[in-house]
Image (cartoon, rainbow, N blue to C red):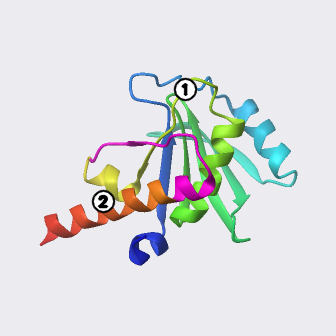
Amino acid sequence: MDDDAAEFRTMFIFSPPEGAPQGWGLTFPSFTDALRTKEPGAVMETWSGQYTGETLSFQFGTSVGDTAEGMVGVEPNGVAIEDCTAAEAADFAAWLQQAIVPAGSGLMVNIREGVEWELPLVELRSGTVNELEECLVGHVDRVLRYEEEQLG
């Protein structure tokens, strides 16, 4: 694994496959219930923004014992977590696959920088947390290399 990509902290954005914006059937109550099962004391707040619509923000414990923040949107379905490494995002993605993503639906991911450069999403196939981390580090590395090439 590329050490720079493995240690890079960014926003990871998870969503159903393109063309299926309601692919998970995600609702704020279903997400809240699933997160409270994992973390009974999780802090959550619903808010509405002019450009973002209704959003549920939340805090969760990362795999390294830190607290991170995220947000959920239901139209279209999607979950983003902020300021995380690929390892922390892999642990979160494994939980999403187990608790949120219905069987037969996919889990796509991008990072903030990939979105800014309009780079395609990457599919996260079911696997171990280590396999998910490997995929995420590879994606972060590709995005960072692309950004470096573009900026010269």
- Which residues make up the magenta segment? 119-133
Please tell me which residue lies in front, 38 or 73.
38
Q: Quadrant of residue 74?
A: top right
Q: Residue furthest right?
A: 40
Tell me which amino acid carries mark 1: Ser
In the rendering, at what x and y percent does residue 23 appear?
Answer: 53, 23
Residue occupied by mark 2: 143
Q: Mark 2 near mark 1, Cβ–Cβ under 8 Å?
A: no
Magenta stretch: includes residue 132: yes
In the rendering, at what x and y percent does residue 79 appear?
Answer: 56, 43
Relative horizontal placement of residue 138, taking residue 125 as reference (left or right): left
Which callout, 2 or 1, points at the residue further toward the start of the chain? 1
Quadrant where the C terminus is found in the figure: bottom left
Q: Quadrant of residue 36?
A: top right
Residue occupied by mark 1: 105
In the rendering, at what x and y percent does residue 39 appear?
Answer: 82, 52
Query: Label 2 crowding class (10 Å Cα cut-off): few <14, some 14-19, many 20+?
Result: many
